[in-house]
Amino acid sequence: MIVHLHIGTPKSGTTYLQKVCTRNRERLADAGLLWYGREWADQVLAVRDVLGLHPGGQETDEAAGAWDRFCREVDAWQGEAVLLSMEWLVHATPEQARAIVDGLAPHEVRVVLTARDLARAVPAQWQEQMQNWATWSWEEYLDAVTADEPLQHDAGRQFWADHDLHRILGTWLDVVPAERVAVVTVPGREQGPDVLWQRFAEVVGLDAAAYDTTVEEGNSSLGAVSAELMRRINVATRARGLEWRLGDPLLKWALAKGVLTARRESEPRLALPDRHHCWAARESRRLADAVGAAGVRVVGSVAELLPPGPPATPGTAVVSTEQLLDAAIEGIAGLVTTISGVAAGQQTPSDVLRAASYVTDEDPVPCGAPAAGASAAGAVPVADHPLPVLPVPRRTPRLAHRAWASVRRVTRARTAPRSPAVAVSGARGR
């Protein structure tokens, strides 16, 4: 039997593909392909388990045994293939990749890697980190990622751990023959997401037209203003000692995903600055050459790994106080509405997370400082004091419910009718 491992990269349409597979779970099973797990969180737990990952630095038994459960289901499946999709697999060490492949024997492991050009990947990755409690400014992130020695910087290590195709392919090609590895390139925006699904379906042996691709947008992105707002909120909430486990459902899922992503079209777009285009072209060429030299199957075109050129409409690195205030007001209003609904029992935590397109995969953690020499009336420089970046995973529903339970307890305590005061005279009670 064939086991397809879709290993990432992050921000390459993975959430969209995962949603399509989840929506078509029964159709996939009818076609002989098992989309593993009762929910996609089961895939996350399996990968956490096999890679020994402990999100937030806190070891729990939540993922214990999850990889063995996956392997048992693979063994029991009577169809032709199994599919698991989880971006964390790009972080596997050579030893872990070997253990994964050996553990799935005698089944045939095939690896699928989706990838996009760096000019699109850098801004997409940065704004995602702003939703994951990171505090690097846009300029700090750019400086780290594009440095001559990026691995000497936390932000550089975070980005290249996710997007160094040369290293990622090298790791998996040590344990899987090149003819069983495929790179699917992400098409340009003008082609639409269905093209990505068609390419992915071709790799895993499916008739793309037989499946319903009408899913909500994948992992929604923030505009430049909302991303910078989230960065400042991250700085402030960290300084106040908010626990990430409790803050994530509120900040990422209710505020960022649930409210601020809807503002994206009305906000300035974040794009790689022109001054970094030569870097993006050079590094993208290096990665494209590595893909070509690897001898793996490419579905799409290696040319799509190269940036097409500077954007016609440059992205912004400056946001004004007024823009931040507008985003903050809308964010607060949306967040209060959500919390009120949960506290009043009109919504459940699951309703909130579902409305925000909540997914339970997990990302490593990290907007924008003004471009060099840039100035504008009312412009706010965005290079505050970055705090140490923690590994920030997306959480499981169990933790989300725990966080929302805390919100409801606090709300009820503050709105409960007070008992009438009792006058006490004489000696205090013992």
Image (spheres, grey):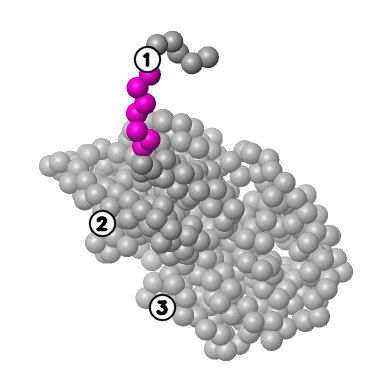
Q: Quadrant of residue 100?
A: bottom right
> Quadrant of the image for the N terminus?
bottom right
- Which of disc 2 and disc 3 is earlier in sequence? 3
In the rendered image, which residue does mark 3 sit on?
191
Front in this rendered view, residue 118 or 90: 90
List the single residue furthest toward the right: 106
> Residue 254: image x %, image y %?
41, 54
State the SS at label 1: loop
Q: Amino acid at mark 1?
A: Ser
Is the residue marked by circle 2 packed among few (<14), some (14-19), or many (20+) residues within 10 Å?
Answer: many
Q: Is residue 162 left or right of residue 296?
A: left
In the rendered image, which residue does mark 1 sit on?
425
Is the residue marked by circle 3 packed among few (<14), some (14-19), or many (20+) residues within 10 Å?
Answer: few
Q: Is residue 373 visible?
A: yes
List the single residue furthest toward the front: 426
Magenta segment: 418-425
Q: Quadrant of residue 415?
A: top left
Q: Amino acid at mark 2?
A: Pro
